[in-house]
Amino acid sequence: MARINSNISSVIAQSNLGRSQAELQLRLERLSTGLRINRGKDDPAGLIISERLRSNIDGVEAGVKNSQRAGSMISTTEAALAEISDLLNSVRSLIVESANTGASSEAERQANQLQIDSAIESITRISNTASFGSLKLLNGSLDYTLSSVSAGAIRTAKVNNASLINQANLQVNVAVVASAQVGALYYNGGTTTPPGVLASAMTLEVAGRSGVQTVALASGISLSQVVTAVNTIKNFTGVEAVLINNNANSGIVFRSTDYGSNSFVSVSRLNKPQNTAEDTWRTYKLADSSPQFSNTPFGWSTLISAGTLFTADRDTGRDVQALINGNLAAGRGLDVILNTPSLGVELTLDAAFATDPTSTATSFYITGGGALFQIGPEVSALQQTNIGIGSVAASKLGGSLVGGKLQYLSALKDGQGLSIRDALANGGDFSGAQAVLGKAIDDITVLRGRLGAFERNVLEPNLRSLQSQFENLTASESAIRDADFAFETSKLTRAQILSSAGTSVLSLANQQSQQVLQLLG
């Protein structure tokens, strides 16, 4: 070739040298950043999926932190509740010790009362001061707020969890579908003349949930006196008696003092006569499908012939059954419990409402509150959970009916109605204080168990799942976006060799045009 205006060899060498240097720069960039994809042109599809994976990884990482923080908050709450539980147990031992009036002095009982008062005050103080950062844990600020709760239908209402996403309030409808019942046995007075009296002397064995006692009854006493004798020992048996229609001639109903399948009544005659004709004692129970009656007059022969009543000396109560927002709630006596992802409630129904399936359904509203935990990588109802933590102040714990009045733990303080002094003034009856204290202990232990179950069965599995997702997503993102150093260094070596060779070749190509000078001699 003898042309000098166009050095094609040089152009070719320059082009190849440019490619080699671009390749060299690419490998150096990947090795210096550790990434295979540094800009969209490196791998457009890979960039899209890796960016999505990065977003997922950041969300999962935030979920892990949220779950860990929620677990720390629950653990702090549980530690405070453990202290309250210890205080309640100490109050219980002091109550039991003070009931031993035959071996304790007035000064000792006064000292015990002082300890009880200070323990109750400490419980309220823990309720007001337990906190996690600036978040109060046990003063009721994490409880749900309710409105329009009918006192005539619902005695107490506790919301454990409720989803209020996209709604200002949540309506809760409660309808009784099967009545709560006490165990009940009926006695029609036999065939005595005159009616309303016992025809012969007998000893009755009366048994209930609380225990067993015997009652010796004389011949000829009125059924009113039988009722009085049975009611005298009802604290020992858990069985009470009332006259049907408030008339001794109508008979007696023996019934358990509590509702539900855990309550029962048993009334049987001991040492029955050999001749059954002389045994005028007959008690009856209702068929399971029959509604209970107590003070309403009825025809014995009609009910017996219809199969509504039949002979029995034992009967068991029945738990209430109710629909809550269309879901069948679990019943326990007068209590109903519903536990679903969107709503978890514990209700104690009023006896009049719970025993009447024909009564109109009642409703109330959850208007806010609760503790909401975002435990997933995306903000949605499926990746959130909530729980309500009510106040554990003494004025909120242990709500129990004592003498027809709802009493709380604060009533055990001196002068508040259930103190040691009040019990002694009532003939040494500590049953009210014992009932309230037992309910308060149950309230705390159930709350601790609920928080423990939430931590163990919700937070910890969620944390392990998120950590596993984090590992797998990170590995997937790394496989797509990170540079393979073994591969890149081999490509770097090739690019370096080609760049050096290209430079040498370009130098030779440029020198090749000078050979035409030899033609000029």
Image (tube, grey):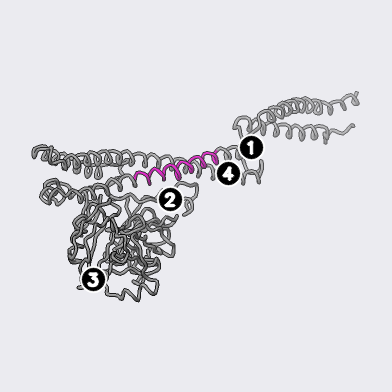
Q: Quadrant of the rendered structure where residue 333 is?
A: bottom left
Q: Is residue 334 left or right of residue 405?
A: right
Magenta residues, dominant SS class: helix
**In the rendered view of the protein, which quadrant contains the N terminus?**
top right
Residue range (magenta): 447-470
Q: Quadrant of the rendered structure where residue 178 is?
A: bottom left
The CA distance from mark 1 to mark 3 is 96 Å
Residues packed near mark 3 inside 10 Å, few (<14), some (14 to 19) or many (20 plus):
few
Residue that badge 4 annotates: 53
Horizontal and vertical percent for residue 474?
57, 38
Residue 148 appearing in the image: no
**Tag shown at residue 479:** 1
Residues packed near mark 2 inside 10 Å, few (<14), some (14 to 19) or many (20 plus):
many
The disc labelled 1 sits on which kind of residue?
Ala
**In the rendered view of the protein, which quadrant contains the C terminus?**
top right
**Tag shown at residue 385:** 2
The disc labelled 3 sits on which kind of residue?
Thr
Residue beneath the point at 16% across and 40% down: 100
Which secondary structure, mark 2? Answer: strand
Residue that badge 3 annotates: 192
Mark before the other along the chain sequence, 2 or 1 = 2
Q: In this view, does 40 lie to the left or right of 269?
A: right
Residues packed near mark 4 inside 10 Å, few (<14), some (14 to 19) or many (20 plus):
some
The CA distance from mark 2 to mark 1 is 34 Å
| Magenta stretch: includes residue 491 | no
Of badges 1 and 3, the one in the foreground is: 3
Which secondary structure, mark 3? Answer: loop
